[in-house]
Amino acid sequence: MSYERMDEPIEMIVHFASKKVIPLRFLWRNLPHKVQTVRGRWVTLEGRQKCYHWAIVADGVGSCEISLDIEQMLWQINTVSTES
Protein backbone atom coordinates (compact mmCIF):
# COMPACT_ATOMS: atom_id res chain seq x y z
CA MET A 1 0.00 0.00 0.00
CA SER A 2 1.33 3.46 -0.90
CA TYR A 3 0.79 6.59 1.16
CA GLU A 4 0.89 10.28 0.31
CA ARG A 5 2.32 12.67 2.91
CA MET A 6 -0.19 15.38 3.93
CA ASP A 7 0.73 16.92 7.31
CA GLU A 8 -2.39 19.09 7.23
CA PRO A 9 -4.36 20.33 10.25
CA ILE A 10 -7.69 18.72 11.09
CA GLU A 11 -10.41 19.31 13.65
CA MET A 12 -11.01 16.20 15.74
CA ILE A 13 -13.78 14.76 17.89
CA VAL A 14 -12.59 12.06 20.29
CA HIS A 15 -13.89 9.93 23.15
CA PHE A 16 -11.87 9.56 26.35
CA ALA A 17 -12.27 6.16 28.00
CA SER A 18 -10.08 4.19 30.42
CA LYS A 19 -7.11 6.51 29.88
CA LYS A 20 -7.37 6.09 26.09
CA VAL A 21 -8.16 8.62 23.38
CA ILE A 22 -10.48 7.13 20.78
CA PRO A 23 -10.79 9.11 17.52
CA LEU A 24 -14.41 9.33 16.32
CA ARG A 25 -14.75 12.00 13.62
CA PHE A 26 -12.67 14.71 11.99
CA LEU A 27 -13.01 17.65 9.67
CA TRP A 28 -10.44 17.83 6.88
CA ARG A 29 -10.55 20.28 3.97
CA ASN A 30 -14.02 21.32 5.17
CA LEU A 31 -15.40 17.78 4.82
CA PRO A 32 -16.48 15.57 7.76
CA HIS A 33 -15.08 12.02 8.04
CA LYS A 34 -16.18 9.26 10.41
CA VAL A 35 -13.53 6.92 11.82
CA GLN A 36 -14.52 3.34 11.02
CA THR A 37 -11.57 1.43 12.48
CA VAL A 38 -8.53 2.16 14.63
CA ARG A 39 -5.76 -0.17 13.43
CA GLY A 40 -3.01 0.96 15.78
CA ARG A 41 -1.68 3.55 18.24
CA TRP A 42 1.85 4.66 19.07
CA VAL A 43 3.80 7.51 20.62
CA THR A 44 6.89 9.26 19.25
CA LEU A 45 9.28 11.64 20.94
CA GLU A 46 10.77 14.62 19.18
CA GLY A 47 13.16 15.98 21.77
CA ARG A 48 10.98 16.21 24.89
CA GLN A 49 7.81 16.61 22.91
CA LYS A 50 5.35 13.70 22.77
CA CYS A 51 3.29 13.09 19.69
CA TYR A 52 0.48 10.53 19.66
CA HIS A 53 -0.35 8.71 16.42
CA TRP A 54 -3.23 6.55 15.19
CA ALA A 55 -3.53 4.38 12.09
CA ILE A 56 -7.19 4.56 11.13
CA VAL A 57 -9.68 3.84 8.36
CA ALA A 58 -12.17 6.67 7.77
CA ASP A 59 -15.13 7.27 5.46
CA GLY A 60 -14.15 9.16 2.34
CA VAL A 61 -10.42 8.86 3.11
CA GLY A 62 -9.58 5.19 3.53
CA SER A 63 -6.45 4.22 5.43
CA CYS A 64 -4.58 7.12 6.97
CA GLU A 65 -2.45 8.25 9.88
CA ILE A 66 -3.51 11.05 12.22
CA SER A 67 -1.56 12.57 15.07
CA LEU A 68 -1.87 14.84 18.09
CA ASP A 69 0.98 17.13 19.06
CA ILE A 70 0.40 17.51 22.81
CA GLU A 71 2.59 20.61 23.22
CA GLN A 72 0.75 22.59 20.53
CA MET A 73 -2.59 20.75 20.92
CA LEU A 74 -2.58 20.31 17.14
CA TRP A 75 -4.29 17.47 15.30
CA GLN A 76 -3.01 16.55 11.84
CA ILE A 77 -3.68 14.09 9.08
CA ASN A 78 -0.17 12.88 8.29
CA THR A 79 -0.58 10.32 5.50
CA VAL A 80 -3.40 9.05 3.28
CA SER A 81 -3.51 5.84 1.25
CA THR A 82 -3.19 6.43 -2.48
CA GLU A 83 -4.92 3.14 -3.27
CA SER A 84 -8.70 2.90 -3.69
Image: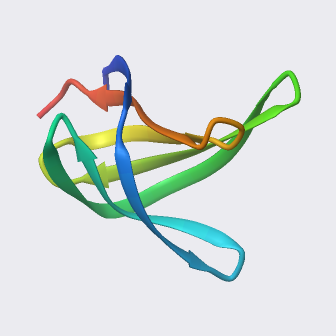
Side of 83 where 69 appears, left or right: right
Side of 36 where 65 appears, left or right: right
| In the rendered image, the vertical position of residue 30 relative to residue 78, given as above or below | below
Foreground residue among 44 and 37: 44
| In the rendered image, the vertical position of residue 41 relative to residue 5, given as above or below | below
Q: Quadrant of residue 45?
A: top right
In x, y percent, where is residue 57?
Answer: 30, 52
Residue at 25% in and 48% down: 27
In x, y percent, where is residue 61?
Answer: 19, 42
How are the colours assigned in the image? rainbow
Foreground residue among 56 and 76: 76
Instruction: Work out which residue is located at the far front of the displayed protein and give it.
Output: 72
Residue at 30% in and 42% down: 63
| In the rendered image, the vertical position of residue 47 relative to residue 61, given as above or below | above
Q: Quadrant of the C terminus?
A: top left
Instruction: Work out which residue is located at the far top of the displayed protein and give it.
Output: 5
In x, y percent, where is residue 44?
Answer: 73, 34
In x, y percent, where is residue 66?
Answer: 45, 41
